[in-house]
Amino acid sequence: ALPRWCHALPRRCPPLFSADSRRRLLGLTAFGTSHTVYRLQEAKVAAARARMADRMRQHQQRLARAREAQDMEGIARATDEVDEAERRVYSVRIGAIKSDLARVSRGSILDSAARLLQYHSPQRHLLEVQFHGEDGFGTGVTQNFYEAVCAALQRRAANRAVPMWIPDGHPDPGPAEADAAHAYLSNPEGLFPQPLPADHPSLPAVCDLFLLLGRLFGKACRDRFTVPLPLHPHFFEVLTGTHRADASRPLALLRTFGRPVDAIAPSDDWTPMDLLRALSTVWEEVE
């Protein structure tokens, strides 16, 4: 186990450490022993493969020439050389981490993802996803799963039904335009949660979507996938508690969503909750 300060110092003084160092610390300490061993193992395999790249290329060239000349003895020797090089590269591996294969429906991707992640978020195994009615599987298909969920969370019509994000002011597309680019929210600064009153009828459904989003981020971070969701920088500040007292920031946030800059008065001591309350007030007035 690492000393406690190894975790505390990067959290309290992140500028002292590069983003890559903090990312490696997170990856090697936050997800359990099996994931730590797996990441160290894959790093060693990648380094060994890089060292052997030239030699492997030479072996493969000799194999190609032997096949072209139909030299059976040359083919056998070159094949043995390639196999030996591969064996040396993978000799540092202890074994593969366990993975679970799940099937989801593209037609109801949010419901499928919510059920899947509710079950699998406590699991330590890697998650691989396959779509119903499709043959493909593997890392490419699993990455497509994360992309499909993010796309569904940005649909303008879905956001009107369950107001998760502050809308961008454009009308919902017609049936013929449902799959067009403007069927999705397109705020250039990114997505920011829509403040809702405590008694809003859609609040439970919105909370369920944010629970899904949190589980999606956690699973992608642990399994090393990308979640292509364009979140507003101020939303990240609220999530991480790094919001700085700056009178211009709430006004800048309002401006990104087309609100007048004089909608709220500037202050010297804005907090994340002050910002959300101000946004809620402005949004109620707009409604």
Image (spheres, rainbow, N blue to C red):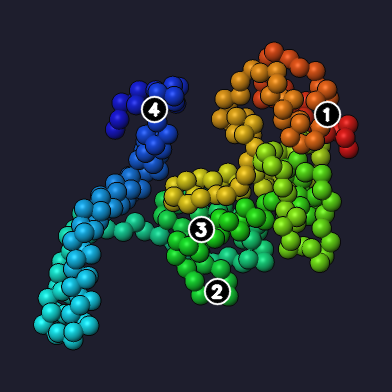
In the rendered structure, find residue 23 and report the number of the disc placed on it: none
For residue 263, which quarter of the picture?
top right
Q: Which residue is mark 1?
A: 260
Alpha carbons under labels 3 and 2: distance apart: 15 Å
The residue that appears at 67% across and 51% down in the rendered structure is 153
- Of the numbered discs 3 and 1, the one sitting upstream in the chain is 3
Q: Secondary structure at mark 3?
A: helix
Front one among 61 and 11: 61
Q: Which residue is mark 2?
A: 134
Tell me which amino acid carries mark 1: Pro
Q: Position of residue 22 (x, y in %)?
A: 40, 33
For residue 155, which quarter of the picture?
bottom right
Tell me which amino acid carries mark 3: Gln
Alpha carbons under labels 3 and 4: distance apart: 29 Å
Front one among 165 and 5: 165
Q: Is residue 260 above or below residue 172?
A: above
- Of the numbered discs 3 and 2, the one sitting upstream in the chain is 2
Q: Which residue is mark 3?
A: 143
The residue that appears at 61% across and 20% down in the rendered structure is 244
Q: Secondary structure at mark 1?
A: loop
| Labels 3, 1: front one | 1
Q: Is residue 255 above or below residue 246?
A: below
The residue that appears at 67% across and 63% down in the rendered structure is 108
